[in-house]
Amino acid sequence: MAGGGHNSLAFDPALVKYNQMSVDRYKHFKWTPRTAWLSIIFAIAIPSSLYYVANKTDGKYAFRGKRRGDTMKEF
């Protein structure tokens, strides 16, 4: 009943190849100007811009407890 060595599921060769590539990605990674630029953008520029926007609008808008005719801006 338990059997051995045979799969009940047929694997797609393309997905198996993609999975193996994903597992071994660190072996094939190479720093190039493009990967360095993308790393800077995703690690520094996007989080810092989101932080800036969050700090500039912190407490500026109140969406709760407003009545008809009241503005959403606090100051």
Image (spheres, grey):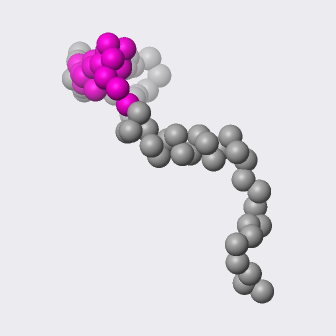
Q: Is residue 12 above or below residue 36?
A: below
Front residue of 75/17: it is 17
Residue at 43% of width from left, 38% of height from top? 25
Residue at 32% of width from left, 13% of height from top? 33
Residue at 31% of width from left, 23% of height from top? 31
- Most prominent secondary structure in the magenta stretch? helix
- Give the x, y percent position of residue 57: 27, 20
Span of residues in magenta: 29-52
Residue at 44% of width from left, 17% of height from top? 69
Q: Tally the numbered discs.
A: 0
Give the position of the N terminus as an image quadrant.
bottom right
| The quarter of the displayed image where residue 56 is located | top left
> Extreme bottom residue here?
1
Give the position of the C terminus as an image quadrant.
top left
Front residue of 4/8: it is 4
Say whether residue 61 is visible: no
**Side (left or right) of 26 relative to 4:** left
**Side (left or right) of 62 relative to 58:** right
Front residue of 69/61: it is 61
Front residue of 70/41: it is 41
Residue 36 inside the magenta-drawn segment: yes
Residue 27 inside the magenta-drawn segment: no
Q: Is residue 47 above or below residue 13?
A: above
Q: Is residue 62 above or below residue 7?
A: above
- Give the x, y percent position of residue 58: 24, 25
Say whether residue 40 is visible: yes
| The quarter of the displayed image where residue 40 is located | top left
- Give the x, y percent position of residue 13: 70, 45
